[in-house]
Image: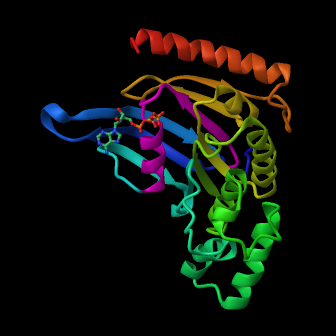
Amino acid sequence: MTSTQAPARAAVTLDGVTKVYGRGAEAVLALDGLDLTVRPGEFVCLVGASGCGKSTLLNLVAGLDSPSGGSIEVAGGARPGLMFQESALFPWLSVGANVELPLKLRKLDRAQRRDRVAELLRTVHLGDFGKHRPHQLSGGMRQRVALARTLALDTPVLLMDEPFGALDAMTRDILHDELERIYLERELTVLFVTHNVREAARLADRIVLLSSRPGRIIHETTVDAPRPRRIDAPEVAAIAADVTDRLRKEVIRHGQ
Ligand SMILES: Nc1ncnc2c1ncn2[C@@H]1O[C@H](COP(=O)(O)OP(=O)(O)OP(=O)(O)O)[C@@H](O)[C@H]1O
């Protein structure tokens, strides 16, 4: 019997991606022939030693920079949404106006924008904060606004660079739950960079460990513990311990 189902296309494909910064004696090889395929709906966490090229990789997938070699493909040519450790909100705009910006760029009319902003703020549990200014919010709330603004792009691919790295453990824990809920509800594909191996084991379907610079993939861990997970669950701790051990060996090998 022949199957009529086409194999699921990759959401993001990196094929032999190399990135060199600078030239000549000053040149820095940040990524070296990196291959990575992210399936639609997959949550992939990238971990690795400081400076191994994690942010470089996300910036390349986001289209903010071009690879020196190899190719990057995002399914359907969709431009991914990108979120950083800092919320990067416009301080002079209200929370609602910040979330509205991508909708304006997408040329939605005023009524559509109003409805979408209200819906997105409810999604991140900030339904009553649309008129506030970013400085009136806590760090965790600002990251919720940043997430709502990214979701306003209506992109299926979310790139997150240490988005919760500056938050306290309790706030981070709550935001893990929120992100997981939104990821599942909206069937997003997520590429998430973190230094926090526990966070990776809490969130990921797959943890990709990069070598020290130049970044190459040295190990991949499939996390099949059921969702939602607790960050202090024994299976999360066991996976985190294994990845930490591998990361420690890599850092020692590299002499850092
Ligand atoms: N614009 C640039 N010019 C020159 N070198 C750069 C530039 N951007 C990054 N690098 C270098 O490339 C390497 C990879 O940097 P990148 O920021 O991607 O690493 P990272 O894994 O995200 O680091 P961290 O975990 O510390 O955030 C580092 O050695 C960095 O110094």
- 242 relative to 192, above or below: above
Question: Which residue is painted at 66% across and 32% down in the image?
Answer: 206
Q: Position of residue 222 (x, y in %)?
A: 69, 27
In this view, which residue lies farthest toward the bottom?
110
In this rendering, the count of numbered labels is: 0
Q: Within the magenta stretch, is there residue 79?
A: no
If the image is split into quadrants, where does the N terminus sit?
A: top right
Splitting the image into 4 quarters, where does residue 216 fall?
top left
- 139 relative to 194, above or below: below
Quarter, ligand 1: top left
Question: Which residue is painted at 48% across and 46% down in the image?
Answer: 58
Q: Along the horizontal axis of the image, is 244 left or right of 29?
A: right
Q: Position of residue 140 (x, y in %)?
A: 71, 51
Residue 241 appears anywhere in the view: yes
If the image is split into quadrants, where does the C terminus sit?
A: top left
Splitting the image into 4 quarters, where does residue 192 fall?
top right
Question: Which residue is painted at 51% across and 45% down in the image?
Answer: 13
Q: Nearer the viewer, residue 158 or 83?
A: 83
Residue 154 appears anywhere in the view: no
Q: Nearer the viewer, residue 193 or 71?
A: 193
Q: Position of residue 17 (x, y in %)?
A: 38, 39
- 126 relative to 113, above or below: above
The image's colouring method is rainbow
Q: Position of residue 230 (x, y in %)?
A: 84, 32
Which region shows up in magenta?
Answer: 40-63
Q: Along the horizontal axis of the image, is 156 left or right of 186?
A: left
Question: Which residue is painted at 27% across and 41% down in the image?
Answer: 21
Q: Along the horizontal axis of the image, is 254 left or right of 157?
A: left
In this view, which residue lies farthest toward the left?
24
